[in-house]
Amino acid sequence: MVGANLSAESDPSRLEGSLILLLHRFRRSVWVGLLLLFPVLSAASPKPISPTFFGINGVGYFHYLTAPDAHTTARRKMRWLKQAGASSDRFDFWWGVMEPDKGKWNWKDSDWLINFYRRNKIRMLPILCYNAAWMKKSPSTSVDDAEYAQFVYQVVRRYRKWVRDWEIWNEPNIPTFWKPQPNAAAYTAMLKAAYQAAHRADPHCVVVGAAANEADVNWLLDIAKNGGARTMDAVSFHPYSMSDGPDQMDLARQIEDVRLAMKLSGRAHIPLWITEMGWTSSIGDPASVNRQSRYLVESYTIAAAEGVQRLFWFALQDWGEGKTFQGWGLYSPNGRPKQTTIAYRRLVHQLTGARFVGYLPLNRKSKANGFERLGTGYVFTRRHHTLLIVWARNGRTAKLNLPGPAYVANIYGNPISLKGHTLSITDSPLYLDFNRLIHFKQMTVQRPLRRNLLVNPSFERVDGENPYGWHRGVFYGGNDKGTFSVIKGGAREGRTSVGLSKTTDALWESYPVPAMPGEKYTLTGYLKTDHATGANGMQILFLGGPGWSWKGGPESKSVDGTTSGWVKVTITGTVPADADVVRINLFSRNNTGLVQYDGLTLTRK
């Protein structure tokens, strides 16, 4: 059943954007003070959703421009992009191809491509990247910046009649795209030069900056510290998931953190663009395709609710890199459409022209916390209709009492027959279209808060041999020397706990939790031991920067020997200035016995 509203968040619209000066000398104490000034932001937008909200990283012409069938391939990809319903495409403009020698310009390929998009009436977002042909590393000097600015000026001036939006580089906050190592000061210097050059060539253009891999708020804040916050007209980021779906990765919170970072930088109202985001699937694995389709619908719905202006899905088509299959696309490598293509087209049909008006929490009563959030509905209005897009949290089921007749369809547009006025909600989104304006008593304009930030904190969901939401060792390898166990029976909460035994260095690692510098986190959990030796406990681990490097974090006092029952552990830590991710580690080192863990709660103050 739909329950009462969750705690409300407020919108600090009264605060000014003059805090940029503080960023030049910020310390942890400053961050704590700033975060207390800024309550959680709410981003319900009265504007209807534009067709340009729906973009794809699609045609990708520069990746195969030397192939003899390049034009044929581009036409085929364009046909797919339009069939999916997208109205925008994001693509590379490679500096090294367009200016092969200093001052010598090759416009052949870019001219063809611009005219190609014009004929197809698709809005363009070119990425002005990467190194010049004569550069061995990414721009790092004033001379490099001037040369890049000249490239930007020439391109924008040439195509200003047809192209409005320009993105400055791609993911410069990771070594893959900024050599030899990411450098916020160097990128900002280049961004400033590019912004001035672009606006000199076209005063009405939109310069999209940051282009961050993940929702890297410290990258955004470092750009601001170096004076770059006002040298972009929109800020872009790529919130790929290191968890599972949009709910598990807390996509809404990641968007909120980006908005807060820009508010702290003096740009409270700068448009937010997600220029890459996606999940993989294989056309031969229907379950993976359905998951990709679900997450696509959830991502766009959450982004629309949180006020994101544009979202470019990654990507249009799967591809191979050597022996590695990259299944990010809506189409298979041989051009077969996945069901995700149908889901995308249906989503465009449902959301174009709609206005987000509020959230509908799906709750049930709980003895432990008063209620448990089972899912969330997102309420939109369009042409005197009410549209509800709703799903339950992963693995949950909720009941929704309908306030009136509605047309119900799944993510592919297939109708769902109703029996009575109660609808069962699962983790696969549903569209409910009411042919009148509906007022939901439980609706709130503030996003429902999470009581516990951890996924599967009591280990009740087990996939195969692992508890869902937890890694054996560090997710990229290591800290896995020991025996990992999922223990049925004898748990403190529910039926299942996890254990570590015979360890030299082992840990269970949680899914990541997005965070902001200066925030305070408290972990409460329970453990018990049986002839345990060595060091056994829990840790709040902070991570940040390229590759999510470890920044340390508080550990609980070690427990060894044999406890008489479950022992409560509580630890608290503050996110350092260079971190923006929290993980929980359940660790055991040099332990010849057994340690069990259960009943975890992570909260944010």
Image: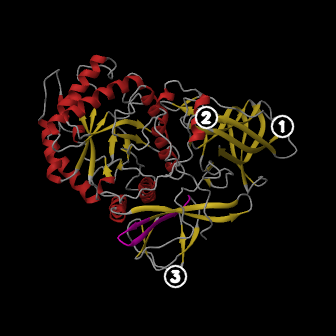
Apparent side of residue 91 relative to residue 390 in the rendered image (left or right):
left
Residue sitting nearer the eye, 347 or 574: 574
Residue hosting label 2: 32
Quadrant (top left, top right, bottom left, bottom right) of the C terminus: top right
| Earlier sequence position, callout 2 versus callout 3 | 2
Instruction: Identify the residue shown where x is 62% and y is 48%.
Output: 453
Query: Residue 193, how many percent across, how many down?
Result: 29, 26
Query: Residue 155, how many percent across, how many down?
Result: 18, 33
Residue mark closest to the camera, 2 vs 3: 2
Residue hosting label 3: 419
Residue mark closest to the camera, 2 vs 1: 2
State the SS at label 2: helix
Which residue range is magenta in the image? 380-393
Apparent side of residue 318 relative to residue 202 in the rendered image (left or right):
right
Instruction: Identify the residue shown where x is 85% and y is 46%.
Output: 565
| Earlier sequence position, callout 2 versus callout 1 | 2
Q: CA distance from mark 2 to mark 3?
A: 52 Å
